[in-house]
Image (cartoon, grey):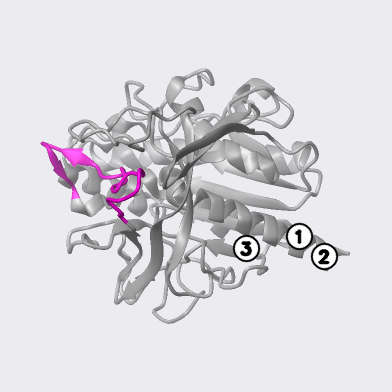
Amino acid sequence: MFVRFALPGLLLGLASVAQAQTATPPAPAAAPDYTSDTSWVCLPGRADSCGTPLPTADLNPEGFGPVAPATPAADPPIDCFYVYPTVSRDPGLNSDLDTGATEERGAAFVQAARFSSACRMFAPAYRSLTLGGLSPAVPPAALGAAFVTAYGDVLAAWRNFLATRNNGRPFVLIGHSQGSIHLLKLLQEEIEGRPAARNMVSALLIGWAVQVPPGRDVGGDLRSTPLCRRARQTGCVVTYMSFRAEAPPPEASLFGRATRPGMTAGCTNPAALAGGAAPLDAYWFTSGAAAQGANPIIWSSAGQPPAPFAHIRGLVTGACVNDGPVGYLRISTSADPADARTDRIPGDVILFGQPQPGWGLHPADMYLAQGDLIRVVQAQSAAFRRRRR
């Protein structure tokens, strides 16, 4: 999620988006034609953002290993429905539907493509709320209308997916930030208590609060869908918002906090669903530019990355923290100045030369534990199919 505005305005904008979920919506504009393949950023069997090999090299304490391409599975047993975050730089409050746009295709490439090793990937193009929509100058009513348009597109894509593309196969929902907001609403309104729930393997709702009563795994935002707490548990939600251990969510933070009284922000550590701290299995996009105002990361003193993606095990450790309304994945870095690996990771939102504490490591949420998330999906898929047999 790229950032161009001051933090208070961004939080105001996101708060308005959250309120728009429960407000009486205006009639949305007509949704795109999702019967057309051109209305999708990713479809199975196509050489698109989710269907191309991902050149990846392990980053070890001694340096980089050889480059190996991660490729989509030939015939994965489940489907994934991915909704990308707020990335569009288009003018106005809603993005256009240009599926060739760099931002949307890039988000799918770095966040979702690697899941093609576990599932057939479907990612609709939708008129997402743009970066400009997060400006504090946007009236709440206009922001709410833009959000309704975005969700209306996701809903139309979902209904087309179920009716003509999924063919009754098990599925996983995957979203980050704005994508998770839309998928949470979709789960509430279109899946819980409906026939589709029988085919839901899990939902990965990353970078947005799925609220639960303290000490419980269900009963807040979702009526019957619990947080995932076991490796082979299905029909559940994996969710977290990441913050550095030394910079937990501040009082004014929207991320890492519940917004409803009496609730906490749910947190599930994909590397340790049952709880506790665990090393994370990360995939970093090393070819991306550093955030404005941030110092570039020297990934290894032994040389430059030989591939666009670096696979790094154990450099960071994650542990869920819940304390009152606060809930987040606490990220600790295992720095070792004696080895060649970087001693710091990117992910902060930098404004005016300073990290913004209310954002935590929001831009890096999906990278930090992508390997763990994929393994969770693979284990859930296997367990789901065993039960079906």
Q: Residues within 10 Å of mark 1 (few under 14, many from 20)?
A: some
Residue 128 shows up from this direction: yes
- Per the rendered image, the range of residues in magenta is 335-356
Q: Tell me the residue at 37%/57% (across/down).
A: 241
Task: Name the disc covering residue 386, or none.
Answer: 2
Q: Tell me the residue at 59%/36% (across/down).
A: 113
Image quadrant occupied by the N terminus: top left
Q: CA distance from mark 2 to mark 1?
A: 6 Å
Indicate which label's residue lies in the foreground, 1 or 3: 1
Percent x, y for residue 108? 52, 33
On the rendered structure, is 356 left or right of 344?
A: left
Contact check, label 2 and label 1, Cβ < 8 Å: yes
Q: Residue furthest bottom?
A: 215
Task: Verify whether residue 349 appears in magenta.
Answer: yes
Task: Name the disc covering residue 192, or none.
Answer: 3
Q: Residues within 10 Å of mark 2 (few under 14, many from 20)?
A: few
Amino acid, disc 3:
Glu
Percent x, y for residue 183? 52, 50
Amino acid, disc 2:
Arg
Residue at mark 1: 382
Q: Tell me the residue at 33%/77% (across/down).
A: 262
What is the secondary structure assignment of the residue under circle 3?
A: loop
Contact check, label 3 and label 2, Cβ < 8 Å: no
Amino acid, disc 1:
Ala
* Residue toward you, 297 or 272: 297
Which quadrant of the structure image shows residue 300? top left
Image quadrant occupied by the C terminus: bottom right
* Residue toward you, 260 or 131: 131
